């Protein structure tokens, strides 16, 4: 397929027309029935069979149902709330409390609405700072990260050995060049 | 308990973590028996989703057994075998009453643009996910869906996200009898979207990807036409030509923010710059390849920042663009009917099984597309003896 030449001028198009495609004609569309060859073909042809039709089945609701009347979950630590929310939601996740410098950055980011780029860029920057904080904490506990296991690199050895050899060869070559040039400078 | 935790881009670690507790009277605790790694988990793994904190546990596709329930939980009880839709939702608010469970307003304090999702950063509520031995399930009466005996755990775990997501993508495409449908992405969601397009009476379905092994699987699983976009010089031209210059009736973006095919988009959206909410190449190809007045269905996930989308072309062509995170509960009953009718067996897409302890390899292999991987399944220690018996 790669050698196909795009016809880009009127001459090309007229002199050497590209063969047509394989789309259905109107008549074929009206009568198409592939149920014999594809299991379940057409079983949801009728929109009534499709759970999402109509998509907005109850348009008459008002704002009173936005926040439901249930017990409020109590925050075990600081929970960030979007400025676009009218209140803290009744339920929320408590996975990782904001801590350290990354936590401060997240506190700052959540002052902006979701429409502001500053919010998202600050959060992404906080994520990177958080990664460094994680490594520092590991090292402080004298448990440096096991990168081979964490990055799943054993699978690279099992399933993509050529790439491992390639990376090893390139690293070796770079190291050799470095050592040679360093020796010459001396 | 044993749980996967995020340590930074491309790094995950399995650690002992405290078991989750009932934090709200409507919570339940579920013991996980199967979890999957989703393509959208890779966006987290690659560090593309803002507010992904070190120490958080991913996993929004899981099934299990109810271990404990809060005092206000009435329908589900300890011992029930349940599948848990990836959306966290109250089932009662303005949006839930409209069936827009993925847009629930009562479960994510961190953002209003997206609802709550298990194990998907603090941007979606800060909940820990199911790539662990146990997980907290809020609003359990709605969020834990009992599994009947005729549905296997392997099929059920695909019903928590990938299969209903693919189905909704096809439904949002507004397919009519004989329509031509092009699906971008031959990952599990794209495969289920292609399969579902047939259910809705499509006349032609073409699936586009860059991995030949995935396309080969797509031909077998979804009986559709396939195209490796690397094999053509200009994909939009090719798609126009193969639709007799009309354009396709509908296009489905089942790729999301890490699409390949445009070096400029990847440079600006992923590496080295992170100026956009990922790469919008699949959306742009969708816009360009559908006919005037056609439909673009976006089910691929994107970050919350701006994207370089060809909205001018969409406007000039009079396109309809539909999108959402899948409202799983809305689609589950119909999706399960298709399984029972023998129209589809979702578990066919599971290509690899990993013990939870080796989840780092699952992520790396899925991310690097090693060993022809399509869908990795993760088994916590307590589920492994049963899994051996089943397979």
Image (cartoon, coloured by chain):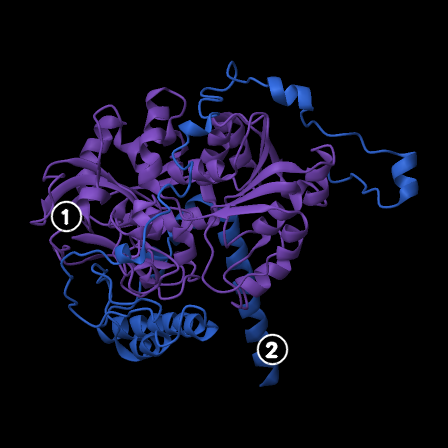
Chain colours: A blue, B purple
Of all chains, the one bearing label 2 is A
Horizontally, residue A137 falls left or right of residue A116, namely left
Disc 2, SS: helix
Q: Position of residue B192 (x, y in %)?
A: 45, 34
Residue B304 lies, with reference to residue A83, above or below; the image says above
Kindly indicate the quadrant of the structure image that contains residue A169: bottom right
**Quick check: can you spot residue B267?**
yes
Q: Is residue A141 above or below residue B357?
A: below
**Chain ID at mark 1:** B
Q: Residue A181 shows which numbered tag?
A: 2
Residue B310 shows in this picture: no
Discs 2, 1: same chain: no
Residue B319 in the image: x percent, y percent? 61, 46
- In terms of secondary structure, where does tag 1 sit? strand
Q: Residue furthest bottom?
A: A186
The label on residue B46 is none
Front one among B103 and A59? A59
Q: Which residue is at the front of the view, B270 or B8?
A: B270
- In three-dimensional space, the C-alpha distance between marks 2 and 1, rounded to whole angstroms, equals 64 Å
A95 lies left or right of B309? left
- Residue shown at 55% from the left, 41% from the top: B211
Instruction: Answer left or right for B270 relative to A50.
Output: right
Residue B346: where, in percent of width, then height?
Answer: 38, 30
Q: Depth check: give the residue in front, B228 or A67.
A: A67
Percent x, y of residue B290: 64, 41
Farthest residue toward the top? A36
Residue B67, quarter of picture: top left
Residue at image point 35% right, 42% down:
B161
Q: Quadrant of residue B387?
A: top left
Quickly name the residue at label 1.
Answer: B28
Give the side of residue B228 with respect to residue A100, left or right: right
């Amino acid at each position: 397929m790669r050698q196909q030449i795009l016809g880009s001028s009127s001459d090309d198009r007229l002199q050497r027309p590209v063969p047509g495609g394989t789309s259905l004609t109107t008549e074929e569309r009206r009568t198409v029935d592939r149920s014999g060859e594809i299991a379940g073909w057409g079983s949801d042809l009728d929109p009534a069979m499709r759970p999402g039709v109509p998509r907005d089945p109850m348009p008459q609701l008002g704002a009173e149902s936005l926040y439901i009347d249930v017990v409020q979950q109590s925050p075990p630590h600081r929970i960030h709330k979007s400025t676009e929310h009218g209140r803290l939601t009744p339920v929320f996740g408590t996975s990782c409390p904001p801590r350290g410098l990354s936590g401060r950055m997240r506190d700052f980011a959540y002052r902006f609405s979701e429409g502001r780029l500053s919010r998202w860029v600050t959060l992404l920057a906080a994520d990177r700072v958080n990664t460094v904080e994680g490594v520092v904490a590991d090292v402080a506990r004298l448990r440096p990260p096991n990168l081979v296991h964490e990055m799943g690199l054993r699978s690279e050895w099992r399933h993509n050995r050529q790439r491992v050899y390639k990376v090893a060869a390139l690293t070796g070559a770079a190291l050799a060049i470095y050592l040679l040039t360093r020796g010459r400078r001396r | 308990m044993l749980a996967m935790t995020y340590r930074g881009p491309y790094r995950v670690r399995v650690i002992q973590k405290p078991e989750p507790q009932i934090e709200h009277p409507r919570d339940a605790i579920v013991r996980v028996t199967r979890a999957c790694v989703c393509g959208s988990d890779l966006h987290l793994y690659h560090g593309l989703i803002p507010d992904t904190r070190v120490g958080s546990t991913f996993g929004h596709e899981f099934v299990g057994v109810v271990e404990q329930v809060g005092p206000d939980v009435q329908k589900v009880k300890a011992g029930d075998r349940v599948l848990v839709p990836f959306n966290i939702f109250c089932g009662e608010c303005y949006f839930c009453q409209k069936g827009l469970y993925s847009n629930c307003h009562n479960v994510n304090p961190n953002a209003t643009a997206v609802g709550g999702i298990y194990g998907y950063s603090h941007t979606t509520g800060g909940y820990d996910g199911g790539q662990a031995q146990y997980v907290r399930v809020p609003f359990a009466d709605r969020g834990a869906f009992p599994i009947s005996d005729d549905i296997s755990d392997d099929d059920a775990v695909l019903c928590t996200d990938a299969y209903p997501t693919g189905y909704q993508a096809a439904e949002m495409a507004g397919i009519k009898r004989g329509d031509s449908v092009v699906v971008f992405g031959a990952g599990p969601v794209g495969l289920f979207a292609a399969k579902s397009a047939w259910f809705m009476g499509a006349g032609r379905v073409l699936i586009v990807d860059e991995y030949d092994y995935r396309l080969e699987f797509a031909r077998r699983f979804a009986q559709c036409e396939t195209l490796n976009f690397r094999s053509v010089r200009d994909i939009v031209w090719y798609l126009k030509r193969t639709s007799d210059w009309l354009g396709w009736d509908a296009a489905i973006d089942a790729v999301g923010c890490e699409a390949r095919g445009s070096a400029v988009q990847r440079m600006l959206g992923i590496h080295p710059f992170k100026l956009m909410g990922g790469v919008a190449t699949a959306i742009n190809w969708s816009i360009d390849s559908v006919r005037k007045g056609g439909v673009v269905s976006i089910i691929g996930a994107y970050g919350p920042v701006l994207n370089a989308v060809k909205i001018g072309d969409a406007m000039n062509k009079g396109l309809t663009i539909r999108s959402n995170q899948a409202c799983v509960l809305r689609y589950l009953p119909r999706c399960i009917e298709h399984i029972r009718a023998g129209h589809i067996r979702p578990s066919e897409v599971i290509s690899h099984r990993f013990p939870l302890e080796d989840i780092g390899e699952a992520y790396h292999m899925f991310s690097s597309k090693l060993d022809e991987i399509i869908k990795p399944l993760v088994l916590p220690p307590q589920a492994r003896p049963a899994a051996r018996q089943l397979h």
